[in-house]
Image (spheres, helix red, strand yellow):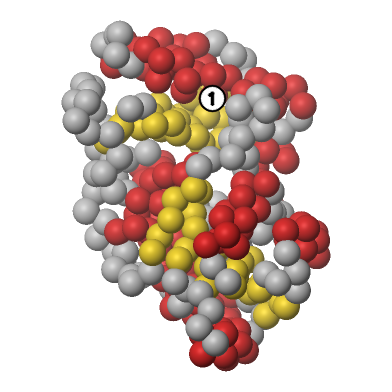
Amino acid sequence: MKIFHNKLELIEHLNQLRKLGLSIGFVPTMGALHKGHLSLLKKSSSNNKVSVVSIFINPTQFNSSSDLSTYPNNLKEDCSLLKNISEEILVFAPNSKEIYGNKMYVKSYDFKGLDKFMEGEFRNNHFQGVATVVELLLDIVKPDRAYFGEKDFQQLQIIKSLKTNIKIIGCETQREKSGLALSSRNNKLSLKSKKVASNIFKSLTFLKSNISNYNIKDLTNAVSDNINSFDQMNLEYLIIADEDKLVPTDSINFKKKYRAFISVFVDGIRLIDNIALN
């Protein structure tokens, strides 16, 4: 498995592969890889002759310096997981200077309201940092296709809104047997906390099952009260929004597609999830 730290070396290698007519898939990550990331790579490998995974902890998308400093960073462990899929995967593990140059910066984007609610409301400028690094990475790799998980559905829609010539592919959220969405943050949960956290997905599936039977406000209030009834859980938001514009709604027009979005603190660990409603 080839590991690149220098972007120019990666670019040169990929240019040689393109000359051979090989298609390139790309999975950007911040490391701390789990089965959710690996499922994206498997999808990429099934669609493309070459798959590139980037492992870069992007400072510009963190709202908290403590969050950044405590984010898990173990390249050796991540590469061991990748080898289990294929030794043909190309790994790009740059430092900040390789991505941003001598001074980090964040571009200013107008996402047409896609970043106004949910994560955008509670994580100021988070998506500006995400979009900046994704554009920089896409410009380096220049893949035919790039793969992102639907667990971060708002992020997926924002990335799709960027003006690139690259096909952005959303992939289904991967879950533990309990229904808990796979996340690097799950490693911070105790077994007891994980068990409690499984109620997040149970709440979403309950909401989906009853969306046609109840008033949305009454339904979301009931689900919110249920989550907050657990001592270890604190609901940050529960929002139903249309998939295209990500605007919250109190009524469903079944000609549109909707999702329920949720953020919950479980023993102080912030977890997000979402589910398609129709």
Kind of residue at badge 1: Phe
Residue occupying the point 59% across, 14% down: 230
Task: Using the rendered image of the protein, determine whether residue 11 is visible from the camera's viewpoint.
Answer: no
Q: Is residue 83 left or right of residue 102?
A: right
Q: Choose top left, top right, bottom left or bottom right for residue 85.
A: bottom right
Percent across and percent down for residue 68 are 61, 56
Count the labels in the image: 1
- Residue at position x 70%, y 72% from top? 88
Camera-nearest residue between 14 and 164: 14
Picture residue at 47% right of the left edge, 73% below the top: 143
Residue 130's spot in the image, x, y percent?
Answer: 45, 60
- Say which quadrant the C terminus sits in: top left
Residue 113 versus residue 34: which sits nearer the camera? 34
Q: Residues within 10 Å of mark 1 (few under 14, many from 20)?
A: many
Image-based side of 127 in relation to 234, left or right: left
Image position of 88 with respect to 149: above or below: below
Tell me what residue is drawn at x 30 percent, y 32 percent: 258
Local SS, label 1 = helix
Residue 163 seen in this snapshot: yes
- Residue on which disc 1 sits: 201
Q: Position of residue 274 (x, y in %)?
A: 45, 33
**Quadrant into which the N terminus falls:** bottom right
Where 207 falls versus 152 (above or below)? above
Q: Position of residue 35 (x, y in %)?
A: 67, 46
Q: Is residue 235 shown above or below 72?
A: above
Q: Is residue 230 left or right of residue 153?
A: right
* Placement of 223 over or under 168, stated as above or below: above
Using the rendered view, name the quadrant where residue 48 is placed: bottom right
